[in-house]
Image: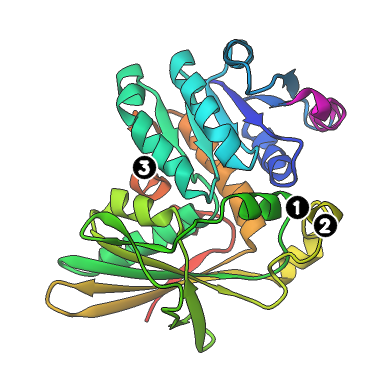
Amino acid sequence: MTTLMIYGAAGYTGGMVAEHAASSGHGLVLAGRENDREKLQALADRHGADTRLFSLDDPDAVAAGLAGISVVLNAAGPFAHTAAPLMSAAIRAGVHYLDFSAELDTYREALALDPRAREAGVMLLPGSGGSVAILGSLAGHAAARVTSPRKISIALHVAGSMSKGSAVSASQSLAPETLQLVQGALVTRSPEDVREFDFGFGPRSSFPVTLPDLLTIHQATGVSDIETFVHVTAGSFATGDVKDLPAGPSFEEREANRYQASVEVTGADGSVVRSVLDTVNGYTFTSMAAAEAARRVLAGDVRPGFQTPAGLFGNGFAETIADTRIVDL
């Protein structure tokens, strides 16, 4: 396997992924829609990559676009619109699929496509960067400290401003209800069930949210009771008209706003362990982790069907990305 395609490379995070992927030594193709032509060409010229233009609305065009590609990394959000057609096309073309979606439905679709992917020998790895890689590594690390883990409560601390693409995705993928995993099934819970997590600088109120990690952590650890929370630093959520937002936070803004995560794992005997992860800004982590995941897949680290980063690469995956560390409390 030698050629990586980044679909949606003209976007804020996609362009950052392309920058990291360009140094891998593999063939690189930057792809997107026709109206992204100029941005893609400028990016391709900078990184010595090729370009392809096609819409995901036409299955035949997608199939032609994936010709000769080994791995496709989907960077085009909202993933609710792009993941399903690109995963289906990748399975038909025998191309391994990655993305960094934070949208639950992407993972439901991957689970539904798992039998077809396994039969075709194709891997589906949504969440190769972002919260799924961060929280999956932390949850797996902490769960390994308990003989028989029964429940995982995990929270992400989001700091700094959002990109325009993230704001659009968030506005279009709001879950109609707040969910948790209970005995392996997704069930509703009250959005008022706020609790405190210590991210390394004292307890912080965190509110329950529906994250794809409810499925991915269960997939990787087998733990059947999981709840996910978020603590958001003031000013992190976009306000006003989305079209007026900048493409994304500047380098200086990213450097000034690190992310953290906190987890509590309860064992069958009632024992509780806690661990905290500290890492670079979420956009920096996502772009680096997605590029590293693609590099590993191109190098042959592949398992057919729906996979998770921690399940495929091990619980230490997040700590291989930039300045990321896990501390046991």
Q: What residue sits 81% from the left and 33% below the top? A: 43
Vertical position of residue 221 compared to residue 66: above or below? below
Residue range corresponding to the magenta coloring: 33-45
Say what secondary structure mark 3 lies in: helix
Q: What residue is shown with label 2?
A: 245
Q: What residue is shown with label 3?
A: 312
Label 2, label 3: how far apart the Cα atoms are = 36 Å
Q: How many marks overall?
A: 3
Residue 316 in picture, x, y percent from top left: 40, 56
Classify mark 3: residues with Cα within 10 Å, few (<14), some (14-19) or many (20+): some
Say what secondary structure mark 2 lies in: loop
Residue 27 in picture, x, y percent from top left: 64, 22
- Tell me the colour scheme of the image: rainbow
**Along the line of sight, which residue is nearer the eye, 234 or 192?**
192
In the picture as drawn, the residue positioned furthest to the left comes out as 269
Q: Is residue 316 visible?
A: no
In the figure, residue 38 lies in which quadrant? top right
Q: What's under tag 1, amino acid-wise?
A: Lys
Q: What's under tag 2, amino acid-wise?
A: Leu
- Is residue 119 a member of the stretch shown in magenta? no
Q: Are marks 1 and 2 in contact (CB under 8 Å)?
A: yes
